[in-house]
Amino acid sequence: MKLDEVIKQIKPLDKEAMQAAKERQDMLTKPAGSLGRLEELSVQLAGIQRRAMPGIKDKAVIVMAGDHGVTAEGVSAYPQEVTPQMVLNFLGGGAAINVLARHAGARVVVVDMGVANDIPSADANLIRRRVGPGTMNLAQGPAMKREQAEESIQSGIEVALAEISKGADILGTGDMGIGNTTPSAAIACALMNVAAEKIAGRGTGVDDDGLKRKISVIEKALAVNKPNPKDGLDVLSKVGGFEIGGLAGVMIGAASKHVPVMVDGFISTAAAMIAVTLAPECRQYLISAHRSKENGHALMLEWLGIKPLLDFDLRLGEGTGAALGISMAEAACKVLSEMATFGEAGVSQVVE
């Protein structure tokens, strides 16, 4: 199904289900509103799933990997070879996302969207949706062709729909790609019309000189490419990445099927900005797992109008924050469905 057709399938949240969930929350054995964000989250999930008693049983974190030509500008503290090495680590179950996903009871879905170096593995669990062997250097010209931007989003939609067809009722987003905080920051700068120094952070841990170089590269990329902030595909193609487009597609695809998406950190939020630019209705289906320590992430979340669940100073990516957020979403559903009401428990309610 083409992108435009998928976007047309995204509907507003179910207000009746949300109202019913809110009314039940107010009858549970606690002061109204005392569980804060858990209550708000349960109501949002009710609207997304279109039922007064939402539930989360089948969980998947989709980790998309891709490389970036901009690493040639010295914007990362790590070499590009780390991308395929970490993909193998994901497949072997040894990365932080594997640990936290196991803790949350979620499966990890690893997708090669465009890793530059071949991944020496015939692992059947690796989904190969390579758009190309990494993007071009966005400081010298467009990161990719517009057709490749469309392909990356389409691939993300298809991966999401495949997981939903297997039973997933919540998806988390994760990323792997050395250098990908640079295109993510460039996307945010383009869409928000803010200076690079307000968004760009240290990523993998670059020093002061590295940060200055990174800011300069982003400024150059924006000046050279002049991405159109009203055209999400133009922004993605000019200064984005294959895995970023893929994650945007995951969000759009999930929203079309009334499935919530737990958005990870800086890179996933840049993808969410692309997704919302293309499909404004999908914003309601997005849940921000956490506020990253990465510079500019808070501004990006404000632009999206999404309040993060956690603030743990995370900046790893991989979907680690999303895995933690999925646990919170499941908890919110269980509080709504398993907690007794005042009437059921025989507990006196507040005195009028």
Image (cartoon, rainbow, N blue to C red):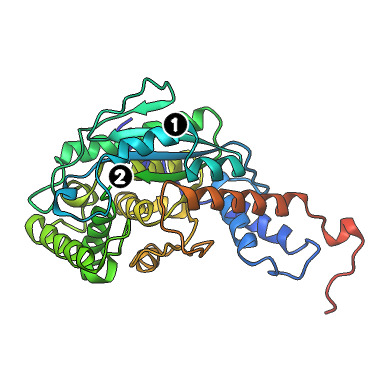
Q: Decide: few, some or many residues near mark 2? Use Cα within 10 Å; few <14, some 14-19, many ≥20.
A: many
Q: Is residue 187 above or below residue 147?
A: below
Q: Quadrant of residue 155?
A: top left
Q: Residue at x 87, y 59 (%)?
A: 343
Quarter placement of the C terminus = bottom right
Q: Residue at x 34, y 53 (%)?
A: 267
Q: State the image coordinates of residue 217 (x, y, percent, origin top left).
A: 14, 60
Helix, strand or loop for disc 1: helix
Q: State the image coordinates of residue 118 (x, y, percent, origin top left).
A: 26, 28
Inspect the image, locate mark 2, and give the three-letter code of the amino acid beneath it: Gly
Inspect the image, locate mark 1, and give the three-letter code of the amino acid beneath it: Leu
One can see residue 282 in this view:
yes
Helix, strand or loop for disc 2: loop
Quarter placement of the N terminus = top left
Q: Is residue 120 above or below residue 72?
A: above
Q: Residue at x 70, y 50 (%)?
A: 334
Label 2 vs label 1: CA separation? 15 Å
Q: State the image coordinates of residue 208 (x, y, percent, origin top left).
A: 24, 69
In this view, the residue farthest toward the bottom is: 352
Q: Is residue 120 left or right of residue 347?
A: left
Quickly name the residue at label 2.
177
Q: Is residue 330 left or right of residue 5?
A: right
Q: Are marks 2 and 1 in contact (CB under 8 Å)?
A: no
Residue 91: which numbered mark, if any? 1
Q: Is residue 25 left or right of residue 350?
A: left
Q: Nearer the viewer, residue 229 or 72?
A: 72
Q: Residue at x 17, y 54 (%)?
A: 74
Q: Decide: few, some or many residues near mark 1? Use Cα within 10 Å; few <14, some 14-19, many ≥20.
A: some
Q: Nearer the viewer, residue 347 or 327?
A: 327
Q: Quadrant of residue 222?
A: bottom left
Q: Quadrant of residue 121?
A: top left
